[in-house]
């Protein structure tokens, strides 16, 4: 097992709350992490029909089997348990008693907010970060990293990416979709997901997506919500401050994992990626996902945005830090160009927020024109800089 940076956060939250919930996409390592942190707790999968039937038919009897708590995997499959868990932990008052894991964001979080508010420490676990792979000696070069993504199965079990992602989409994504909504035309949904992958790191245009897939605008909106709920995509909101300019109001679409986006978009190798038009968007997608992982592993809310005015001037990423904004420009090229700094310098003039950083596809770190230039391998340092300041 490759150690996860979220482990320390899970242990810390278990000292503060009677229940810890670990949520995130399927196959991101939630169960492995829960078992590693709590090896002495019994493990129960509520995907197992027998366990789920028992929990539904006799929730008090089911929980009585675990007087010292347990790891309840895929807990959103049995939301009826949550009210009984509330009564149990309120009476017991021990911290770190139960651990819940779940893959469907809306299902698990809805149950927590309704029955377990104030009793749960929540950790969002995403696929590996570059730092986790580097510490395990498994970090590939940049194009290979973007192409194969960072899901644990590709590194722990050495499954070829094209095999792993084909099985992942067929086994998990489409099954989850059937559980959450009634998709009558699965082929249209597959086409929709592929169209989204081709648009990663772009503003969302639901009307265009709907037209390309032959579906209605409302259907496209519902399907985007399903992809969000399954932790496949995120919508990065625009920042609201206009600095005297008209702003873009549409959020930007990002996949949490570049390997999945590359596979869906039909990229067959790192070489094809290096020569194709998706390399820049996938690099931006990867940097944004690394910033998200950095915060999720510490149980921090994202507080991340982008900024774009009506003339097309854009800051790729804005990290909110109290009353301050930390701007991040993202460039996939390996050679630093002078014109990369223009938008950051203009933004500093408009906002009064000097500094920020530029993350690029090269390897050297330096300070130029008051801006930290950081190579892709040091993306964690950039995320920490955005969090704590220079």
Image: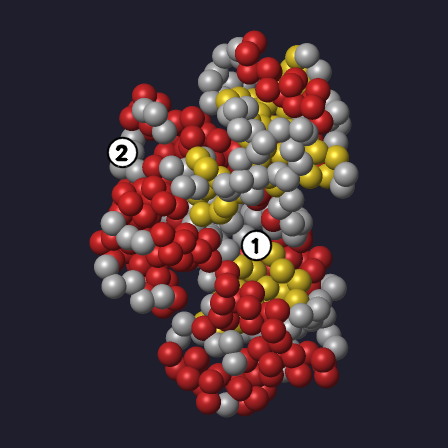
Taking the spot 50% from the left edge, 41% from the top edge, the residue there is 250
Q: Position of residue 268 (x, y in %)?
A: 27, 33
Near mark 2 (Cα within 10 A), the count class, few <14, some 14-19 or many ≥20, is some
How many numbered discs, if any? 2
Name the secondary structure under disc 2: loop
Residue 258 in view: no
- Depth check: give the residue in front, 37 or 237: 237
Question: Residue at 39% of width from left, 75% of height from top?
Answer: 48
First along the sequence among labels 1 and 2:
1
Say if 361 sits above or below 81 in the image.
Answer: above
Q: Nearer the viewer, residue 145 or 80?
A: 80
Image quarter (top left, top right, bottom left or bottom right) of the C terminus = top right
| Residue 371, quarter of the rendered image | top right
Image position of 10 (left or right of 56): right
Query: Is residue 64 visible in this depiction of the protein?
Result: yes
Q: Which mark is residue 124?
A: 1
**Res 159 → quadrant:** top left
- Residue 31: x %, y % from top left: 50, 61
Distance between the alpha carbons at the discs numbered 1 and 2? 30 Å
Element carrying mark 1: strand
């Amino acid at each position: 097992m490759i150690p996860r940076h979220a482990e320390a956060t899970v242990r810390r939250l278990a000292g503060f709350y009677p229940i810890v919930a670990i949520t995130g996409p399927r196959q991101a390592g939630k169960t492995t992490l829960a078992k590693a942190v709590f090896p002495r707790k019994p493990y129960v999968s509520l995907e197992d029909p027998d366990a789920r039937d028992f929990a539904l038919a006799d929730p008090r009897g089911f929980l009585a089997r675990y007087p010292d708590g347990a790891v309840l995997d895929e807990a959103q499959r049995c939301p009826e348990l949550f009210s009984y868990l509330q009564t149990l932990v309120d009476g017991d008052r021990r911290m770190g008693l139960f651990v819940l894991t779940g893959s469907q964001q809306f299902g698990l979080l809805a149950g927590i907010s309704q029955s377990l508010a104030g009793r749960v420490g929540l950790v969002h676990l995403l696929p590996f970060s570059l730092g986790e792979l580097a510490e395990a000696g498994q970090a590939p070069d940049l194009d290979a990293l973007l192409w194969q993504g960072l899901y644990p199965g590709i590194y722990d079990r050495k499954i070829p990416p094209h095999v792993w992602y084909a099985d992942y989409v067929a086994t998990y994504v489409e099954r989850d979709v059937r559980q959450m909504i009634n998709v009558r035309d699965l082929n249209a949904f597959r086409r929709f997901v592929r169209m989204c992958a081709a648009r990663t790191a772009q503003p969302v245009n639901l009307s265009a997506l709907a037209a390309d897939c032959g579906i209605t605008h409302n259907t496209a909106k519902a399907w985007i919500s399903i992809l969000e709920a399954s932790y496949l995509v995120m919508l990065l909101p625009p920042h609201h401050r206009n600095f005297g300019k008209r702003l873009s109001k549409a959020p930007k679409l990002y996949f949490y994992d570049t390997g999945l986006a590359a596979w869906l978009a039909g990229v067959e190798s790192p070489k094809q990626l290096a020569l194709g038009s998706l390399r820049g968007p996938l690099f931006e997608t990867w940097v944004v996902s690394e910033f998200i992982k950095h915060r999720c592993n510490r149980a921090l809310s994202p507080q991340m945005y982008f900024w774009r005015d009506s003339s097309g001037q854009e800051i790729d990423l804005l990290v909110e830090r109290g009353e301050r904004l930390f701007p991040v420009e993202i460039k996939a090229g390996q050679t630093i160009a002078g014109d990369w700094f223009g938008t950051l310098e203009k933004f500093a003039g408009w906002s009064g927020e000097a500094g920020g950083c530029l993350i690029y596809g090269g390897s050297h770190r330096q300070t130029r024109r008051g801006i930290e230039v950081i190579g892709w391998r040091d993306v964690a340092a950039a995320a920490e800089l955005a969090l704590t300041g220079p």
